[in-house]
Amino acid sequence: DGAYSFAAIEAKWPAVWDELGVFTPKDDGSRERRYVLDMFPYPSGDLHMGHAEAFAMGDVVARYWRLKGYDVLHPIGWDSFGLPAENAAIKRNAHPAEWTYANIDTQAASFKRYGLSLDWSRRLHTSDPEYYRWTQWLFLRFYERGLAYRKNHPVNWCPKDLTVLANEQVVNGACERCGTPVTKKALNQWYFKITEYADRLLDDMDELDGRWPERVLAMQRNWIGRSEGAHVDFAIEATDDGSRPDRSVTVFTTRPDTLYGATFFVVAADAELAAEIVAPDQAEALAEYQDRVKALSEIERQNTDREKTGVFLGRYAVNPLSGEKLPVWAADYVLADYGTGAIMAVPAHDQRDLDFARAFGLPVRAVLDTGEEDPAVSGVATSGEGTIVNSGPLDGLSKAEGIAKAIEIVESAATGAGTVNYRLRDWLLSRQRFWGAPIPIIHCDVDGEVPVPDDQLPVRLPDDLRGEQLAPKGTSPLAAAEHWVNVTCPTCGGPARRDTDTMDTFVDSSWYYLRYLSPDYSEGPFDVDAAKRWMPVAQYVGGVEHAILHLLYSRFFTKVLKDMGLIEFDEPFAALMNQGQVLNGGKAMSKSLGNGVDLGEQLDQFGVDAVRLTMVFASPPEDDVDWADVSPSGSAKFLARAWRLGQDVLSEPGADPAAGDRALRAVTHRTLAEASELVEAHKFNVVIAKVMELVNATRKAIDNGPGGADPAVREAVEVVAIILSLVAPYTAEDLWAALGHEPSVANASWPAHDPSLLVEETVTAVVQVQGKVRDRLEVDPAISEDELRELALASPNVTRILDGRGIRTVIVRAPRLVNIVPA
Ligand code: ANZ
């Protein structure tokens, strides 16, 4: 009673929800199950506006499905390993766990305040030994299947963070985290063989079409980067002095139809191959060139506008089709780790090759007539469709025919084969950092790599390292923890050492959605029966920044788990929604711009419900929200207005609405019907607009209509409470209670709308005689033309005016108009 106070209702309801366990699924098979998942947070500081938006969106879906009668699982946990905790610990001479778990507590309190319909009983943290025990267990299963292996390889290295980065963590040649240009370093590293799953990762995306955002699917397809083409072997002739014998080098090409247009041959300057094949008199020039290339950052190297550079290696490659001799060059525009690291250069039809040919005066020969200007003259390579020319047996063929024919020729001559090449690389998962799951492998001089036996898991992190001891040194800080490192070999009992690397945190997050299903399960990473009941996730919600990494890795894990026989589905996330960003003044919030908005302050000032409603009302979920353009105070006013309706409902619970005001009922039922469709189409913002209209109509009915005692008013306010509960749980709960219902509104059912109320009962048909209105008839909106004509002609007004005259024509526009023209 009295005035609306968000503080009072925020204090009142959380304890009730907890006690009732409203958001814990029944999991008894009495209802159809649906799993709604928000990407779990990283515990850096308190929650921010971005969390507030993402979680508000996910909660709309979870709450809607609950009201629709589904058994909804909506869990929460933390992705709690990672660098920031370690950096904080180094700075404060503390252990990363202290910072991590303190932040988790802060965020948990904020989530609770935020009124999300989460099942807290399944809470997990990836840095808990009970969790990472199973991350390690999974690693070992991958290892047994040959899907985890170690190799010495030049890797991306961040010279500032002193850590290895996955390809995915290198953005425009710089460290994703700190922006430092990334260099290469040869290190012994652990990899997951994700490339073995490239085709499945690609093909299974078909089942996600229309259910995941188009651009996310495009990014994944692009990242996997499947290219069909051919491997073609070129013989490199021996040097005249015989110091280098002849040998064969294979290229990867997507355009074997252009083989006759190859005028030179290029190997990656930084590939070992270059040094292997260089003629002695060019070796020094190559070494100098390689030094210059090494000095470049990845950003500079990948810049396509950069002038082409390279060095002639003093050797010649023989074209297997034409027998032509092509000079062999080394250049940095050919990448060492793509394809075979060597190419046949076809300058007429590949712009990079053409730029190079022009820089070094190499010949350009067009072999596909596309009707465009000669590339040798225009400087623009042609890549369209056309007819093959200057190409012996391929002449006259189209591009596609030429590709097939060229492959046929090289295959029959055993100098090549059709092949598929992927951009995707194996997943480099080891990190030389402390705060992650230790890799459960022991290195023994006698037995080599020995997996830690399952019954010795988890391999716990030592808890006595502090501050500086955790600082990155290029090797893992764990290497210095002698008491931890030195163990006996599980196989021979002799002295051995633990692997000192930890796993990329993306390993932790690749399977957390399964752990939620049975968070205390101790027989395995998850209860396979629970996975059968709940998976796949019906709706996943999170930022587009995870479009590649996290989603690809989770999909890969799912496929491996399927191959292990633990699950029966191929894709973990049946539907994906990417929420937009929260901006301020049109720009992303940042410290340097000083445009940050503190979530806690917004909640203090306007209340949780007003902030949530503002987030959802601002735009469709996938669009950005500019906080400078929205009005949380307007939202608060609307909520108070909605809440006050509860005080003016004078009928008793259960009053039969059928006897109530039909006009208001029509608005209520239309709102219900539209809100359902809108939620399902993810147009949450429009749902808010609709409920605002319903609140206005109800207020009018109370003040200037049938009044608060009319049961149609009760019906309307109940619907307001139910729809509002999707975004404003406190206000909705209080309103529900004011209507005399037991908590919680989350346990209510989404009322079925009555379709007969959606049609207007009658419409007014105007009857004219010679253009003059002579009568108005209330008719069924579905009336037929014949019925309406008959009614109009039977009207006493009409017969009087006609006064016995005959009729020339009757124009009928059902259900609104009849025009009678007398004879
Ligand atoms: C001859 C040719 C003619 C090519 C032509 C293209 C057009 P995608 O589609 O991205 O897979 N290539 C192969 N390996 C390379 C490497 N390590 N570094 C740089 N470029 C490389 O690209 C495949 C094409 O990129 C291959 O087909 C090859 O050039 C080049 F008219 O071969 B092509």
Image (spheres, helix red, strand yellow):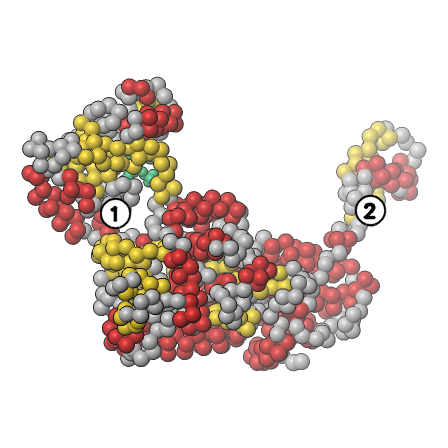
Image quadrant of ligand 1 equals: top left
Say which element carries label 2.
strand
* Residue 548 visible in the current orientation: yes
The three-letter code of the residue at mark 1 reads Gln
Identify the residue under disc 1: 302
Choose between 382 and 160: the one closer to the eye: 160
Q: Residue furthest right?
A: 804
Choose the circle earlier in sequence order: 1 or 2. 1
Identify the residue under disc 2: 779
Choose between 281 and 797: the one closer to the eye: 281
Choose between 637 and 243: the one closer to the eye: 243
> Would residue 790 be found to the left or right of residue 28 on screen?
right
Q: Residue at x 58, y 53 (%)?
A: 681
Q: Which of the 4 quarters of the picture holds residue 713?
A: bottom right
Q: Which of the 4 quarters of the picture holds residue 115?
A: bottom right
Discs 1/2, front: 1
The three-letter code of the residue at mark 2 reads Val
